Image (spheres, helix red, strand yellow):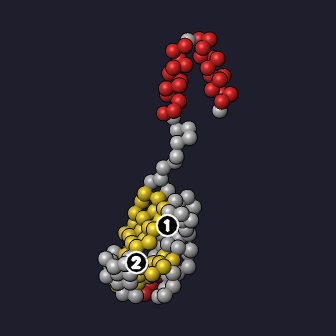
Amino acid sequence: MRRMLWAMVLLVAGVRLRWLLVVLLVAPLSAWGQPSSFVPAHHSIGLAGPLSGATNIRPAFNRRLLGLINNSSNVVFCTVDGVDAAVDEGIRLAATGTTGDRVFFDRNVPQGPVRCFSATAASRVLIIEGR
């Protein structure tokens, strides 16, 4: 990087000195060395009772954020490794408004499909993922 900068300095200094000023002012504005950003997306999944363990959010191998939020008054179980969710299997999300109704992964984010299960109908899970 330093060699490239010196080569640019010598090249520009031979032509015009003000181009050097432009390069030095514009280069820090480019994407070099900037942290990459992610785009959050959300899915609101309706669970329809015992067969809802097959509800699937596809795997995302570039996922950097995952949030699961229970948006119902029923307990919901979710898995993040592709295994079908069932009662007492996976991550337990308590009823909305109580402790344990949400879980977020921002380190060691699971990349597999998300599957959720509710023993009762009319349950909803909000799934937030960032890439």
Q: Which mark is residue 60?
A: none
Provide residue 129's location: percent of width, then percent of height: 46, 62
User: Residue at point 48% right, 49% down?
Assistant: 37
Left or right of 71, for residue 55: right
Do the residues under discs 1 and 2 have CB atoms within 8 angstroms?
A: no
Q: Residue type at mark 2? A: Gly
User: Residue at point 45% right, 81% down?
Assistant: 92
Is 117 placed above or below 63 here? Answer: below
Mark found first going from the N terminus, 1 or 2:
2
Question: Please, which residue is most extreme toward the right here?
Answer: 3
Question: What crowding class fits label 2: few (fewer than 14 Cα within 10 Å), some (14-19), or many (20 or more)?
Answer: some
Question: What crowding class fits label 1: few (fewer than 14 Cα within 10 Å), some (14-19), or many (20 or more)?
Answer: some
Q: Residue type at mark 1? A: Phe
Provide residue 42's location: percent of width, then percent of height: 40, 63
Quarter residue 99 falls in: bottom left
The CA span between labels 1 and 2 is: 14 Å
In this figure, which residue is indicated by the disc labeled 2?
A: 100
